[in-house]
Image: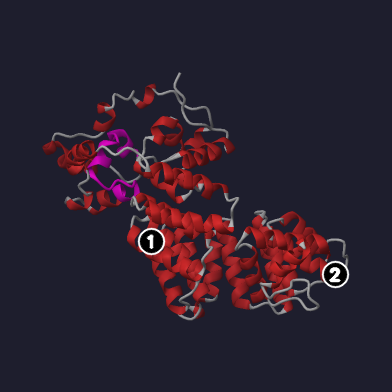
Amino acid sequence: MREQIIMKSIAESGIDLFAEELPSMDKIKKLCEFVHSSERNLLAFREQLEANMPKTSQKTFLAMGIGLFILGRNDEAIQKLEKAKDCMEKFIYLAFALRKLRRFSEAINSLQKSLDYQADTLSTTLEKVATYRQASNFDAAAKELKSCANFENVSAEYHCQLGRLQEVQGLYEQAADSYKKALELSPNHQKAFFHLAYRCDLSGDEEAAVDYYKQIISTSPVYVSALVNLAVLYEDMNEFDKACLCIDKVLEHHPNHQRAAMFKKDIESSKTMFYDEEKEKRKDRKNQILETPISDFELSVRSRNCLKKMNIQTLGDLLRITEAELLSYKNFGETSLREIKTILEPRGMHLGMSFEEKQLPHPETVERPVGDDGILSKSIDDLQLSVRSRKCVQKLNMHTIGDLVRKTEAELLGCKNFGVTSLNEIKKVLNNIGLSLRTLE
């Protein structure tokens, strides 16, 4: 009976990786999406692979290698693929598995070999672009893109890869335009949709992000990352029921998804939190001036750009940074500092005022966390946190890993919508690099 259920699940995809003839690249891609659409499909596919494991033909080695890659078992995938007969599919999936293991040079070589077996030139070139980008070799990625520039305004994938490269280089507006162009050419391009939504989310355009995420899940009902990110946005908007619906959709198909399960608990806690209306009104009145956007004031282009890069968007943000921190930023000099003081002084405010009001010790007196100074100076972006955690650290005006490890668990949990899920995520990524949050004796 169990075997019948498994076979039925696999048959639903309409694609058999172990058929007499290997499915096309497009069909293998659809099979991958089907397998990862639910835990049921994943388990069924895993058992199908195990059943074929004893076979030793070159044809089975190829199918097994591709299947193991789909399951994320990349070391095993490479071993099987290397035993398969040389062909386009072998070298392409070998490159994919090598790339997952960050063996980028070998992945590039494998992609190059696939061209000898009639691999599509544009697709292969764009995979090289993705490989170089992941290896942080942006010049090489740009060079590969330039070689297929004749596909501009023709290929959606070209514009999607261009957007990904622009984004990692900090060219956020250009990246968004590239994703939009990809969607003009292919309205259902899921990767372009997701990265455009994520870019809007990080840029603070929550309304647009919600719209794009909703479009993704309307055509792909179990796109887990889109559903979770949309749930985060709904929770930020205090639309808890909508957030729960998104997470319930994830758990319906992936009942053991730990992050979704923990996030649901956070949402349920948020729904029952005590709300002091009078206290919130007083807080709103107090923060009215502090929430005034920096864009409302006349500043030089240099000052405005520096503040934007430092994620300082309001007067309140300015009160949470010191003169020394501003002056330490690249291209921010005394002239820009005087401009900032001209904004604050008429309002009885000054830089670092928030720290003084909270009676925090001077940064020099705070115990320095144990760790490599080079790591501490790195951007928090290097930790690759989830959208929710990233937003919370931005609200706390933290930019480097050093800023983060000087915070206690209580300080992080005090940030709105920052729950145990985000705390555990941050503790885990810090522990992976030998660091931890500050503790109070």
Q: In this picture, is 67 found above or below 101? A: below
Residue type pointed to by label 1: Ala
Q: In this picture, is 282 found above or below 234? A: above
Q: Residue at x 28, y 41 (%)?
A: 317
Q: Toward the viewer: 130 or 71? A: 71
Q: Please identify the quarter of the rendering in which residue 440 is found.
A: top left
Q: Residue at x 36, y 27 (%)?
A: 363
The main secondary structure of the magenta stretch is helix
Secondary element under disc 1, as helix, strand or loop, is helix
- Colour setup of the view: secondary structure
Residue 441 relative to residue 117: left or right: left
Place of residue 220 in the rendered image (x, y in percent of width and height, measured from the top left) = 52, 68
Residue type pointed to by label 2: Gln
Q: Please identify the quarter of the rendering in which residue 56 is found.
A: bottom right
Q: Looking at the image, is mark 2 or mark 1 earlier in the sequence?
A: 2
For disc 1, the marked residue is 209
- Residue furthest left in the image: 346
Place of residue 74 in the rendered image (x, y in percent of width and height, measured from the top left) = 71, 56
| Region rendered in magenta | 306-328
Q: Toward the viewer: 154 or 414? A: 414
Secondary element under disc 2, as helix, strand or loop, is helix
- Decide if residue 171 is in sight here: no
Q: Is residue 312 magenta?
A: yes
Place of residue 300 in the rendered image (x, y in percent of width and height, measured from the top left) = 21, 52
Q: Which residue is drawn at 44% across and 36% down?
A: 404
